[in-house]
Amino acid sequence: MRPFLSPRVEVVLAGLRGRRIHVLGPSGTEGSAVVEFLLSHGIATITVHDLEPADRFAGTVERTHRWLDARGRAGLVARMLAAPIAWRQGDRYLEGIEDADLIFVPQSWFRHQGNAPVREATSRGIPLWSMTRLFFEICPGPILGVTGTNGKFTVVTLIGAMLEAAGVRAVVSGNDRTHVPALYHIDRLTPQTWLVLEISNRQLLGLPYSPHLAVVTNISPHHLDDHGSMEAYVDAKRTIVRHQGEGDIAVINADDPIVSGFAADTRGEIHRFSALGPTERGAFVEDGRIYLARAERQSIIEVAELAVPGAHMIENAIAAAAAAAVAGASPRAIAAALRAFRGLPYRFRLAGEHGGVAFYEDSLATNPAAAAAAIAGMPRPFHLIAGGFRKGATSEAFLPMVRALSASSVRSVYLIGSSSEALGSAIRGMPNPPTVVVSGTLEAAVHAAWEAARAGEAVLLSPGCESFDQFADYRERGDRFCDLVASLSPRGAGGPRGPAPSPAPGSDR
């Protein structure tokens, strides 16, 4: 029996029935979720288009659906291949796209030159939808959306935990292949259930909706190859508040000049969060304590009680607190969730400790601003592993990391990947630079850092770059780091060495 659907969902489905629907990328998470949703509601007038030939379909599903186990992925492949839909794969990709009444596209569709026929179809008036738009079309209850350059999913996770602690019904969904798409949760959504979404810049492009409660964490240069300029990137992010109306709420970072400017782009009520001092509405830090700003301030917890160190964690905590309070979480529930949080995989987690040396994994720091936040948050002297792939990398692109390193207790830096030359040049240009070692590979960097680190210090993987020159993605890089840490051997019969002297200023090895 089909789950109960709200009248809103039934109206949307009625508008889709009988239309010639074309779906791009059925081997990806977004494409397969859309196809399965439509099929489950009796809509089979579907043509799917995949760049991969038929014999690679199962392998691509294996790679892109990490939120499913092996049995689940096999079941998905079997259901898709048995479905009464038309397939256009490999050399037949986009064949007949001009006959579509509606085209569902994945969020990265515009990056592929082969999708020029899709652009031509839109110029002839054929509408483009996305999985994200479908969320907004069918969700019967309020949507809380979080965007920003860094910290999005951490904030989403914290909000979900705060609402759960408060007994407020919520469904949480992230934006990568390890997260279950919200379409699979539709039967859990009611008019009283919050749908809490991580929303990327690509998902916001062309989206004609904004969430009822929008959170913007921070904005710094990233994904500029998607948009062509920083201005276009910021404009895409602005979509999260652009379509808000009266009664909606925007929670924005008062400490980020770009984000703060979003207040002029919404008709909703503005709540701000700040690590620098009180705000009129929202959340803030003062004298080492987190507060909610309402009719009167309400104390939450001491900053020192946060288990994950650093300025970025404080920013995430107050962003989540401000939003969760609006959605119905009590100060006590917010405090409980913050005290319990220990970090997320690939986002500044403690990967292990050997001989008094702590190893932190922050592989999702795929841009210099994210790495700078981790560097600034290190609570002890540390050795940094950084680098990877960054398109058109220049020394200037790494200035956020350089500024953070200049104010940190960094001992040495181990460089990996294709950006080593540009990143190394930037770091060597610092006043009193740390030791810089071009290690090349992650394996070499981990072992060299382990040999150099002393008890009481740390080794931090925070690359500031993407991973595609040496790894499939940031997850594989982070997992490999954790494996390497787990396999480290003790250093000599005498055990860990004592505290190390500071490296000679400007020294290179």
Image (cartoon, grey):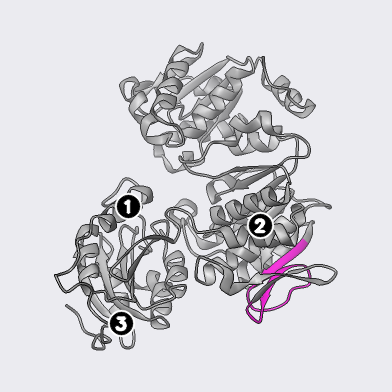
Circle 3 or circle 1, nearest the eye: 1
Give residue 32's position: percent from left, percent from top: 50, 27
Circle 2 or circle 3, nearest the eye: 2
Give residue 83's position: percent from left, percent from top: 49, 13
Residue for badge 1 = 477
Give residue 329's position: percent from left, percent from top: 74, 55
- Residue located farthest toward the left when viewing the structure as drawn: 493
**At 72% from the left edge and 64% from the top edge, which residue is drawn?**
263
Question: What mark, if any, has residue 215 been given in the picture?
Answer: 2
In the image, residue 339 lies in the stretch drawn in magenta = no
The three-letter code of the residue at mark 2 reads Val
In-front residue for pair 486/438: 486
Q: Earlier in the sequence, mark 3 or mark 1?
A: 3
Q: Earlier in the sequence, mark 2 or mark 3?
A: 2
The three-letter code of the residue at mark 1 reads Arg
The three-letter code of the residue at mark 3 reads Gly
Look at the image and tell me in which quarter the C terminus lies. bottom left
Is 294 on the left or on the right of 373, as rendered?
Answer: right
Where 82 falls versus 377 (above or below)? above
Is 401 on the left or on the right of 488, as rendered?
Answer: right
In the image, residue 271 lies in the stretch drawn in magenta = yes
Instruction: Write down the quadrant of residue 359 in the picture.
Output: bottom left
User: Could you tell me how far apart the alpha carbons at marks 1 and 2 are, in whole angstroms?
Assistant: 29 Å
Give residue 387's position: percent from left, percent from top: 31, 63
Is 329 on the left or on the right of 387, as rendered?
Answer: right
Q: Which residues are magenta?
A: 270-288
User: Could you tell me how far apart the alpha carbons at marks 2 and 3 are, in whole angstroms?
Assistant: 37 Å
User: Could you tell me how far apart the alpha carbons at marks 3 and 1 are, in whole angstroms?
Assistant: 28 Å
Question: What mark, if any, has residue 429 been given in the picture?
Answer: 3
Where 11 falls versus 164 (above or below)? above
Where 499 falls versus 223 (above or below)? below
